[in-house]
Amino acid sequence: MTAIGIYGSSGRMGRAITEQIAIEGATLAGGTDAGGDPAVLARVADVLVDFSTPSALGAHLAAARAARTPLLIGTTGLTQSQHAAIDDAAAEIAILQTGNTSLGVTLLAQLVREAATRLGTDWDIEIVESHHRHKVDAPSGTAILLGEAAAAGRGTILSELRVDGRAGLTGARTEGTIGLSSLRGGSVIGDHTVVFASEGERIELSHLAQDRSIFAKGAVRAALWLADRPAGRYRMGDVLGL
Ligand SMILES: NC(=O)C1=CN([C@@H]2O[C@H](COP(=O)(O)OP(=O)(O)OC[C@H]3O[C@@H](n4cnc5c(N)ncnc54)[C@H](OP(=O)(O)O)[C@@H]3O)[C@@H](O)[C@H]2O)C=CC1
Ligand SMILES: O=C(O)C1=N[C@H](C(=O)O)C[C@H](O)C1
């Protein structure tokens, strides 16, 4: 039976994934938190999931690579150079990196891409996300994922179009840009709305997470799928056939 190791096992997501592994009758190889040994866990696990913190990514990638153990990266707030390090490691092991492991957001990203493809640049795209007061990164990994889907629908990459937050005398909106805005408060698990706004009409595509178990279910499903994959960088869409 496939044994799953968890980096960040005592955190909110680590605990939800531990519960999900038990619900599915899968096997838990063990877990680490700050100060743990990622290399030992990588050697005993068949597949690893990382829901910890960006500063730990380098050590987790190195451990997974050395042990040749596939790795699912759910941690958000990653830099461009960390994405380059993931690409590098994916030449040797199977890696799935995603800002959201839920089925709903994976489908939403497809819908957003489709809408952005069909609607011209006179339809402004704005992404609004809300999360609990403990979240340390903004905008959320999901907002970035949805922004990337919208940008892909417009035939480009998010960094070409992205506008983060707005304050002060900003001037009028530049056509074709994609705005990202974040709210933080209370216990919100994770809400995302992609707004397509034109003259006289507006389309809003939303996903509202009501329980962290949706991420845990997707993470366990993706980890079991990833365990047997050859080296390469994968997406949730590959797991779910979307
Ligand atoms: N992709 C997705 O679908 C989702 C992604 N996330 C992302 O997952 C990450 C974790 O979220 P959440 O569980 O809410 O956060 P928490 O703060 O609750 O948990 C983070 C965990 O990581 C541990 N940690 C810190 N440093 C290290 C380290 N060097 N090695 C191993 N573990 C370490 C912490 O341990 P300690 O307490 O000892 O510091 C803690 O147990 C965030 O980036 C979040 O955005 C969250 C939900 C869904
Ligand atoms: O930190 C969280 O809680 C979440 N993080 C992910 C993100 O940054 O998008 C996914 C989910 O929205 C919950």
Image (tube, grey):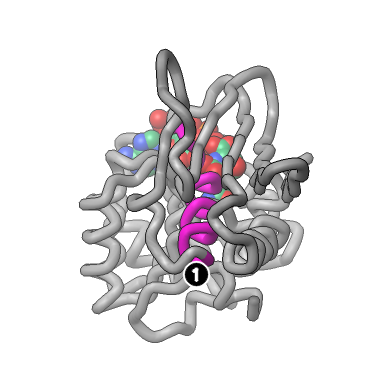
Sort mark 1 into few (<14), some (14-19) or many (20+) by Cα contacts within 10 Å.
Answer: some
**Which quarter of the frame holds ligand 2?**
top right
Q: Residue at x 61, y 30 (%)?
A: 131
**139 w.r.t. 114: above or below:** above
Q: Which one is in front, 78 or 60?
A: 78
What residue is shown with label 1? 235
Q: Position of residue 203 (x, y in %)?
A: 75, 48
Q: Is residue 142 magenta?
A: yes
Q: Is residue 151 magenta?
A: yes
24 left or right of 160?
Answer: right
Quadrant in the rendering for residue 202: top right
Q: Main secondary structure of the magenta part?
A: helix
Q: Residue at x 58, y 72 (%)?
A: 237
Image quadrant holding the C terminus, namely: bottom right
Instruction: Identify which amino acid the numbered label 1 is placed on.
Output: Arg
Does residue 171 appear in the picture of this structure? yes
181 left or right of 18?
Answer: left
Q: Position of residue 199 (x, y in %)?
A: 69, 43
Mark 1 CB lies closer than 8 A to ligand 1: no
Does residue 8 appear in the picture of this structure? no
Residues rendered magenta in the picture:
138-153
Q: Residue at x 28, y 39 (%)?
A: 55
Q: Position of residue 6 (x, y in %)?
A: 48, 53
